[in-house]
Image (cartoon, rainbow, N blue to C red):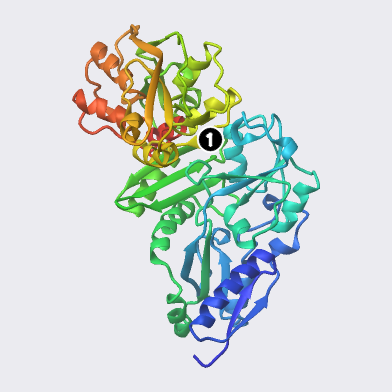
């Protein structure tokens, strides 16, 4: 190519990082590059919140006009800022790799409370201009005060350091790319499956004229088709809901070895409840279409969960927000077993929230210098409520991965497991070759009586003991069946349920997301 390629970019630090990243890729291919900085409406108007600025594409329109007027050859955008349709004459010719899609919560040290969700103190002031982030924060923490936050990434961080907020929410991608000094702030990563990002978050879009064949061929060398497959599904939902940056929509799609997984959240503009869901399958476009239908129409029917209502508040809130009715009845009752002595151990490994509760219900303290392990995030949070920060937290829903990681830490050590009387001993069996395994029973289960016949469209089981007690009393469930994890799924299969549905993680939220996506 004989002509010099002119890249158009906004002037913020992050936009220039994106433009220079693209320039380096093109220079490595042998092209001469010049970067031309263009101010957009979003850059020029800093005193208004986004919903006060008219129109869509207020971070992209001027760049697109420069393309159409042949002032530049290529515009590099943060893909999540783009309207779902390019203006006539322009097209997205390629997309970049995907940086971390998660959100980062930056917290002032004095505003942190490790025992509350997001580790934020009660009634904390959180800065964000995103309706999507606002709706998700308030879903989990309605006590928070959300305050508008504008400016480029360094400016937003400085406003937090100046004490205008207790915490702010930013895309992890921008923080990672700018490598800012965050000394004096606590950074908490909110994974994309928990705090659902904007469609195409973390991806760059390469936009050019649709009749510039030479540039189209060049940009094709930068294109990542695997990324496009996923964000295509995400932006399809955005397009069908006629949304732009202001729509309180989160969508995240990822490719796994054998399937695609998609999470979606929406705060409907008609004021109806916030809703979110999880789906998986072989075709990302089909997942997007199913998610869109669920987001638009909601659901009906009855969901049974094998927990009492006070144990399943988040689950009930989530599934009822999309239209389901719930029946929350635990088919077992739990009885604490007194611990006469506590054996010596280097590690205490708590395998469930219930083992934590029944251990500390006896006013027992942990021995000095013992290290503590938790099966997953739910168990870890239960320990934190007792003032204990685990030294090890396993992978939610994956006992094999958890055991493998813990085996390295516990090699040659003595490990004590507080357990239920009928525990399956999944972790113990996998580490017994390399560690000394000890156990102490802290509770046992007894069948509970059901008040009446359970009739539901979806049945959710949260432990093997719940499976056995339910089927002994009620017979096999007739409807869709969801199991919290693999051991519960195995218990269902052993009792004759052929294909129980597994959520991706063993958390109450993941259970609810899965049910809402059915």
Q: Residue 259: percent from the left, percent from the top?
A: 31, 50
Where is residue 78, by image quadrant?
Answer: bottom right
Q: Residue drawn 34% across and 39% down?
A: 400
Front residue of this view, candidates 479 and 178 = 178
Can residue 421 be spotted in the picture? yes
Q: Residue drawn 72% across and 36% down?
A: 111
Please state the total of marks drawn on the protein image.
1
Q: Does residue 342 lie above or below 460 as drawn?
A: above
Where is residue 444, by image quadrant?
Answer: top left
Q: Residue drawn 51% across and 30% down?
A: 372
Quadrant position of the C terminus in the picture:
top left
Which residue is situated farthest in the right direction here? 162
Can residue 64 be spotted in the picture? no
Q: Does residue 248 lie above or below 426 as drawn?
A: below
Q: Residue 91: percent from the left, percent from the top?
A: 48, 71
Which residue is situated farthest in the bottom direction here? 2
Q: Residue 158: percent from the left, percent from the top?
A: 76, 53
Front residue of this view, candidates 14 and 398 = 398
**Disc 1 designates what residue?**
391
Front residue of this view, candidates 426 and 240 = 426
Secondary structure of the residue carrying numbered label 1: loop
Q: Is residue 23 left or right of residue 120?
A: left
Pointer 1 local density, CA inside 10 Å: few below 14, some 14–19, many at least 20: few
Q: Is residue 159 left or right of residue 477?
A: right
Q: Residue 412: percent from the left, percent from the top?
A: 40, 36
Q: Does residue 481 lie above or below 8 as drawn?
A: above
């Amino acid at each position: 190519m004989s002509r010099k390629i002119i890249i158009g970019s906004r002037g913020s630090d992050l936009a220039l990082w994106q433009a220079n990243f693209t320039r380096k890729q093109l220079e490595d291919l042998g092209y001469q590059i010049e970067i031309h900085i263009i101010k957009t409406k979003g850059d020029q108007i800093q005193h208004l919140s986004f919903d006060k600025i008219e129109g869509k594409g207020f971070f992209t329109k001027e760049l697109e006009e420069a393309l159409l007027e042949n002032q530049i050859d290529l515009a590099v955008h943060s893909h999540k800022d783009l309207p779902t349709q390019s203006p006539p004459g322009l097209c997205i010719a390629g997309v970049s790799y995907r940086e971390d899609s998660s959100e980062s919560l930056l917290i002032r040290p004095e505003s942190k409370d490790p025992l509350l969700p997001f580790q934020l103190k009660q009634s904390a002031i959180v800065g964000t201009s995103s309706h999507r982030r606002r709706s998700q924060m308030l879903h989990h923490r309605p006590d928070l005060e959300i305050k508008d936050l504008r400016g480029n990434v360094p400016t937003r961080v400085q406003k937090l350091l100046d004490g205008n907020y207790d915490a702010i929410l930013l895309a992890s991608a921008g923080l990672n790319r700018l490598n800012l000094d965050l000394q004096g702030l606590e950074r908490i990563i909110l994974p994309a499956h928990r705090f659902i990002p904007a469609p195409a978050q973390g991806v760059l879009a390469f936009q050019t004229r649709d009749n510039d064949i030479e540039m189209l061929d060049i940009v094709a060398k930068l294109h990542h088709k695997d990324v496009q497959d996923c964000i295509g599904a995400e932006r399809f939902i955005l397009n069908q809901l006629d949304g732009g940056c202001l729509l309180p929509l989160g969508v995240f799609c990822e490719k796994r070895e054998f399937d695609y997984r998609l999470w979606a959240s929406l705060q409907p503009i008609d004021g109806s409840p916030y809703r979110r869901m999880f789906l998986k399958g072989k075709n990302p476009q089909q997942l997007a279409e199913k998610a869109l239908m669920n987001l638009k129409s909601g659901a009906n029917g009855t969901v049974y969960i094998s927990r009492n209502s006070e144990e399943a508040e988040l689950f009930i809130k989530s599934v009822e927000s999309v239209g389901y009715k719930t029946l929350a009845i635990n088919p077992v009752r739990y009885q604490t077993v007194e611990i006469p002595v506590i054996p010596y151990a280097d590690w205490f490994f708590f395998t469930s929230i219930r083992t934590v509760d029944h251990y500390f219900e006896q006013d027992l303290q942990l021995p000095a210098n013992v290290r503590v392990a938790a099966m997953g995030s739910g168990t870890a949070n239960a320990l934190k409520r007792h003032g204990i920060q685990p030294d090890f937290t396993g992978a939610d829903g994956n006992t094999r991965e958890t055991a493998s990681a813990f085996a390295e830490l516990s090699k040659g050590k003595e490990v004590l497991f507080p357990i239920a009387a009928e525990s399956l001993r999944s972790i113990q069996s996998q580490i017994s070759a390399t560690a000394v395994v000890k156990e102490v029973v802290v509770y046992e289960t007894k069948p509970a009586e059901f008040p009446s016949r359970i009739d539901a469209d979806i049945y959710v089981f949260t432990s093997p003991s719940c499976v056995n007690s339910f089927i002994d009393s009620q017979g096999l469930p007739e409807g869709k069946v969801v199991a919290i994890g693999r051991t519960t799924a195995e218990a269902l299969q052993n009792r004759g349920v052929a294909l129980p549905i597994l959520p991706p993680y063993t958390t109450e939220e993941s259970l609810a997301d899965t049910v809402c996506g059915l």
